[in-house]
Amino acid sequence: MQLEQVAERIGSRFLRSEPRRQALAYLQGLLSSVERKNSWQLAEQAGDPGPYRFQHLLGRAVWEADEVRDDLQAYVREHLADADGVLIVDETGFLKKGEQSVGVQRQYSGTAGRIENCQIGVFLAYQSAHGHAFLDRALYVPAEWAEDKPRRRAAGVPEEIRFATKPVLARQMIERALAKGIPARWVSGDSVYGNDGKLRLWLEEHPVAHVLGVSGNHFVVIGWQQQKVSAVAAQFPPEAWQPLSAGAGSKGPRWYEWAAVETNSLLEGWTRWLLVRRSLDNPQERAYYRVFAPAKTTLNEMVAVAGKRWSVEECFAAAKGECGLDQYEVRSWTGWHRHVTLALLAHAYLTVVRAQVVGKAPKKRKLLAKTR
């Protein structure tokens, strides 16, 4: 599929032809080799005398980023849908200077590994046998920002937006994806989401299978007794641990030892587990997961889902490195959502094109084999 066809999919979201053309030009710029993908450099690459047209597209033109988000989901569903798909929630930081950019403040950024002046975006990715791409995004607005009316007005934060934790934003995105018919067998995420009991309960009530990371001081109930997960893992007998690969990494299969134990569950046909991963080199180095899945789920299946969570890191790396996800210079609520949504669409296009190329490769090799 050509990029022009992707632009046609979102064309109806723009009432006028000018922003419709600029949207295509913006996507082309995001996918170009321009070093810094902000409005100034994209305009220079497009041959425009200045950044006005792109700034207008991101700030003042009439269109809704959420509608294009819906088109993104339809595009991913059409090309990457898989009954065994995994929805992965994660956040990333966008380092910023000053205090004017919407939602910016000194806060912990997992991307930087420390407290920085930054914005935090929560994202929902989709992993399938055909590839992985983003489905949705939400800007985290800290409580301090949510309660500051002058700052909200200056950044254009809509009146209806209230403070929401990262797990709440994740739940909203998962709910939207499932409502749009995205086929997903599992949900995965790190301890930011696994430690949140309300998110886990919501997933169980629907019910949606999940493998979610939790911290070492998290508690589970086994035999109607609350126990810290680190203490439970320390009691596993040697035969409980199995060496299994969590999938291929940049240096080959990611081998760890894994063990799981059932915890209390009330939903018939479904079971809760505590899943533990430990390093082969250092058995004291462990990671913990809460699992909720059909009762017949195997340890291998749980491990496979836990390993697939890392694909969201590949999505972030590609979206930032190749599609300018973090290279915007907008400050407003509208500008952030418009730039990020178009960057995610550009990344999804790259994913689909690469999947199509890989899908064709075996046929070519087979044809060469026949001619020899």
Image (cartoon, helix red, strand yellow):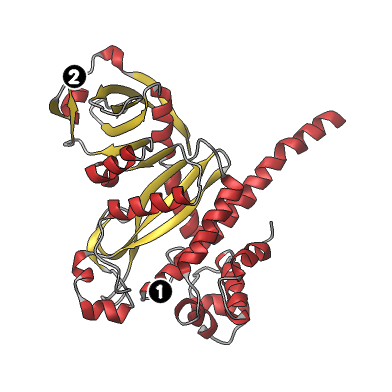
* In this view, 11 is above or below 182: below
Mark 1 or mark 2: which comes first in sequence? 2
Q: Residue furthest right?
A: 371
Judge left or right: residue 153 versus residue 235.
right
Q: Amino acid at mark 1?
A: Thr
Across and down, in percent, residue 4 comes to 67, 66
Judge left or right: residue 281 versus residue 233.
right
What residue is shown with label 2?
Answer: 235
**SS class of the residue under badge 1?**
helix
* In this view, 280 is above or below 347: above
**Residue 152, located in which quarter of the rendered image?**
bottom left
Confirm or deny contact between disc 1 and disc 2 (CB under 8 A): no
Mark 2 surroundings: few (<14), some (14-19) or many (≥20) residues within 10 A: few
Judge left or right: residue 97 versus residue 178.
left
Q: Is residue 260 visible?
A: yes
Mark drawn on residue 344:
none
Judge left or right: residue 82 versus residue 93.
right
Q: Residue furthest bottom?
A: 49
Residue at coordinates 68% horizontally, 46% vertically from top-left?
357
Quadrant of the drawing holding the C terminus: top right
- Between 127 and 369, the one lying in front of the other is 127
Choose mark 1 or mark 2, whichever is in front.
1
What residue is shown with label 1?
Answer: 334
**SS class of the residue under badge 2?**
loop
**Residue 361, located in which quarter of the rendered image?**
top right
Across and down, in percent, residue 335 comes to 42, 74
Q: Amino acid at mark 2?
A: Gln
- Between 66 and 138, the one lying in front of the other is 66
Residue at coordinates 60% horizontally, 83% vertically from top-left?
48
Measure the C-alpha gap from mark 1 to mark 2.
Answer: 52 Å
